[in-house]
Amino acid sequence: MIPFKAFRFLLPLVVREKAVISFGILLILVTSISQVAVPRLIGMAVERLESGIGIDLVIPIAMAMVGAVLIRGITSFWTRKTVIGSSRRIEKQLRDQMFRHIETLDGSFHAKIHTGDLMSRFNSDVDAVRMIFGPAIMYSVQTIFIIIFSITLMLQIDWQLTLWSLIPLALITIEVRFIGPKIHDRSKIGQELLADISVHAQENFANAPVVKAFVIEDAEIDRMHRHSHNYFLQSLRIARVRAIATSSFGLFGDLALVTLLLLGGMRIITGDLSLGEFATFNGCQLLLIWPMIALGWVINLFHRGAASAKRLQDILDATPTVDDSRSDPEMTVERGEIRFDQVSFRYPESNDSVLQQISFDLPGGKTLGIVGATASGKTTLLNLIPRLAPIASGSIFIDQVPVEQFSLDALRSSIAMVPQEPFLFSATIADNISFGVDDASMDDIISVSRLVKMDDEINKFPSRYDQRVGERGVTLSGGQKQRIAIARAILQRPLILILDDVLSAVDSETETTILEGLKDWTKNLTALIVTHRLSAITHADEIIVLDEGRIIERGDHESLRRMKGRYHKMWRRQTVESELEDLE
């Protein structure tokens, strides 16, 4: 049986198109009537020719047949235009809904599903579902109408002959009952194997420099060959089942014609059936054969679509871990004051806490420096401020208000965050800098570029600010990408600026120059700076030192040096390294 419940979540999209779909069904009804009218008219003509009575009506009957054919052609065209057009709109709405929903999901979702798999669902699975509401529905409804009208006409002629003729066609229904689930299961596996191909291709295309650097092109080619071969074998299995179904449908249709020829011929000989009735009966049965054969294709579409719908529903059923239901849509960030009160955090898949009992007060317009060893929880702490992840315990306040009371849009629009690995879009430099700021002028873009010491370098490109940077900014160095990301952040003029080790790819001299330029610009906003270079935060109003998720030291630069603790050791080591570099 076809798992129609798999399509239940799509009902709201279908309801929007109910008027168009209803009109399409009406057109299918007219098309089916015109189709069945043709064998009836042929039978009438044969009766006239056979008996010689009313032979003058043959030409009007022929003209009526022409009219029926013309009506069928016109209604068939508009049927496809309405039903297929409706399915395309459902496809668009579904894809928009998918993208809108995926945009609301946080990092925990994207950590569980590969980008390639997501793209496979976003494209091939949506297309498979679209086929359900286009060709599958159109041919299903047409088959139902043809069966009703044809069998009704056949029963009027000879009910016994009708029953005998339908026995081979009834075998199609039995076959569908057994083959349908196999097609569904194999189609689902096929979609998953196709997703594996997409995942592998996306990872290799996105990380081509890494693949080449480790000289593993042949190994990756072999992996793709295995994925492709597995999908190929599964496709053959699906094709084998479909071939059995399609050929069987044709065989049963031919058996129905043979049955009609044998039994119908005997009835003609005995005088129980006229040639005109036989012609009508034969025409109706011929009309039934194609819908029965098409039924197998439609069943395949439904089962493949059901498998794809289940994969899409898995995405739409996913919920963000960050709860925005308690927020007040009228609440906005005014000053950018930040307070952590005994905040702890751990990842859902881990039993160990990444942050433990973190507390600090950062007044609006002040700067907080955050340092510590690798994996000490620095980035995680920053991610909690724009609520990219939910805290386990404790509270975070913005302007003395619990952060949960701000809507995610209001909270994040007041924050500009530059991550450790900045992401650039495959667009121009100007587009990347002005991303998220629709009204940014060219003067604004150039101004922030000068602030991060990128203007001179940008002007060396052939197209200057109109230079395309390639996918993920592949044509730029690491330091250039970091500086463009900083320029993008400060162009937004946020109340809170978060910099997560964003100058690690530039030399210390350039870093100092950039930080000096940013110092005046950021003096009126709240800044949190994570860095491994302590020289980047000597101006900070307060510095906290993290170790295994806990604050072990805090104070300004000078007070921490006097403590002779972890910060002092880090500062002394970096100072010696800097002096050695100068000697070289």
Image (cartoon, rainbow, N blue to C red):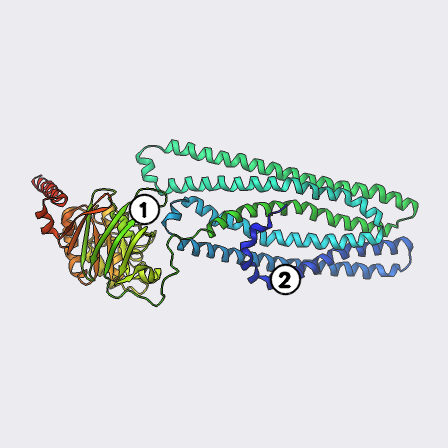
Q: Quadrant of residue 207?
A: top left
Q: Is residue 59 depicted above or below 108 in this figure?
A: below
Residue at which label 2 appears: 22
Q: Position of residue 93 (x, y in %)?
A: 50, 58
Q: Nearer the viewer, residue 286 or 397?
A: 397
Mark 1 or 2, which is nearer the eye? 1
Q: Residues within 10 Å of mark 1 (few under 14, many from 20)?
A: some
Q: Secondary structure at mark 2?
A: helix
Q: Quadrant of residue 413?
A: bottom left
Q: CA distance from mark 1 to mark 2?
A: 53 Å
Question: Looking at the rendered structure, which numbered label has been put on residue 303?
Answer: none
Q: Amino acid at mark 1?
A: Arg
Residue beneath disc 1 = 346
- The three-letter amino acid code for the residue at tag 2 is Ser
- Location of residue 203 in the rendering, given as x and y in whole percent from the top left corner: 38, 41
Do labels 1 and 2 touch, CB within 8 Å? no
Image coords of residue 404 (percent x, y): 33, 59
Q: Is residue 31 left or right of residue 132?
A: right
